[in-house]
Image (spheres, rainbow, N blue to C red):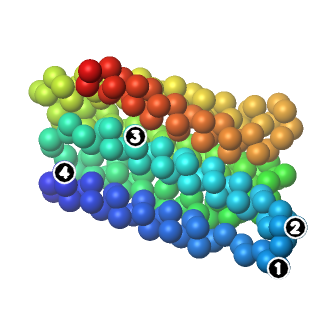
């Protein structure tokens, strides 16, 4: 399979997931600010999930930018990652409807964690099969390093929420963790470009 075909498939799935995510938003009971305020938790969950998926997409772009080869292993890690990403609309609705439930936010946390782990596995597989390209390896090392930061911060989200006894912390930590590699890579790309 060519790289472009896998990238196009990944982009399509992510676009569909984001579309489903917005379609799952509950409409206000009336066209008033008060009615809109009543569904704020659903909007909060939507916003976190949207930016988490957006950060994942940016990180994927950074990961795929210089890759030349893909293998069956890379494809399977991509499929597994997309499977977990496709669950995000479901767990977002579940978490958004139950923001005070540690169990609901724990399910959200677990799904995002599995997506992140498969993203990282995909990155390491890409690095292995593109190891003869020094430019790719240099950028892959930086992204992989910051993905470990993402993973550690992500893992800390659930214990932090338990410690603070405030379940929404899970979603905020997950979103912040996903944005960290994107911001760092963007900064590094500016340095390399000049």
Of marks 4 and 2, the one in the foreground: 2
Numbered disc 3: secondary structure: helix
- Specify the farthest residue to the left: 132
Which residue position is annotated with label 1? Answer: 30
Tell me if residue 144 can be seen: no
Which residue position is annotated with label 4? Answer: 3
Q: Which mark is residue 34?
A: 2
Which residue position is annotated with label 3? Answer: 59
Numbered disc 2: secondary structure: helix
Q: Which mark is residue 162?
A: none
Label 4 – label 1 distance at C-alpha: 48 Å
Identify whether 32 is placed above or below 154.
below
Numbered disc 4: secondary structure: helix
Horizontal arrangement in the rendering, residue 32 relative to residue 192 (left or right): right
Numbered disc 1: secondary structure: loop
Q: Residue at x 44, y 26 (%)?
A: 184
Q: Decide: marks 2, 1 in contact (CB < 8 A)?
A: yes
N-term mark: 4 or 3: 4
Horizontal arrangement in the rendering, residue 179 relative to residue 16 (left or right): right
Q: Quadrant of the N terminus?
A: bottom left
Q: Nearer the viewer, residue 81 or 47?
A: 47
N-term mark: 1 or 3: 1
Label 4 – label 2 distance at C-alpha: 49 Å
């Amino acid at each position: 399979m060519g790289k472009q075909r896998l990238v196009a498939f990944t982009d399509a799935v992510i676009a569909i997931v984001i579309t489903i995510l917005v379609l799952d938003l509950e409409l206000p009971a009336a066209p008033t600010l008060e009615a809109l305020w009543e569904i704020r938790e659903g909007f909060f969950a939507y916003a976190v999930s949207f930016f988490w998926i957006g950060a994942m997409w940016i990180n994927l772009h950074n990961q795929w930018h210089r890759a030349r080869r893909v293998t069956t292993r890379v494809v399977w890690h991509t499929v597994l990652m997309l499977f977990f990403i496709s669950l995000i609309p479901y767990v977002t609705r579940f978490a958004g409807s139950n923001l005070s439930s540690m169990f609901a936010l724990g399910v959200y946390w677990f799904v995002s964690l599995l997506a992140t782990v498969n993203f990282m596995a995909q990155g390491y597989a890409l690095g292995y099969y593109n190891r003869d390209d020094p430019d790719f390896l240099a950028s892959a090392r930086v992204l992989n390093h910051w993905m470990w930061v993402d993973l550690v911060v992500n893992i800390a989200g659930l214990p932090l929420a338990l410690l603070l006894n405030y379940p929404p912390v899970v979603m905020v930590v997950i979103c912040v963790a996903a944005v960290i590699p994107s911001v760092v890579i963007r900064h590094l790309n500016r340095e390399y470009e000049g």
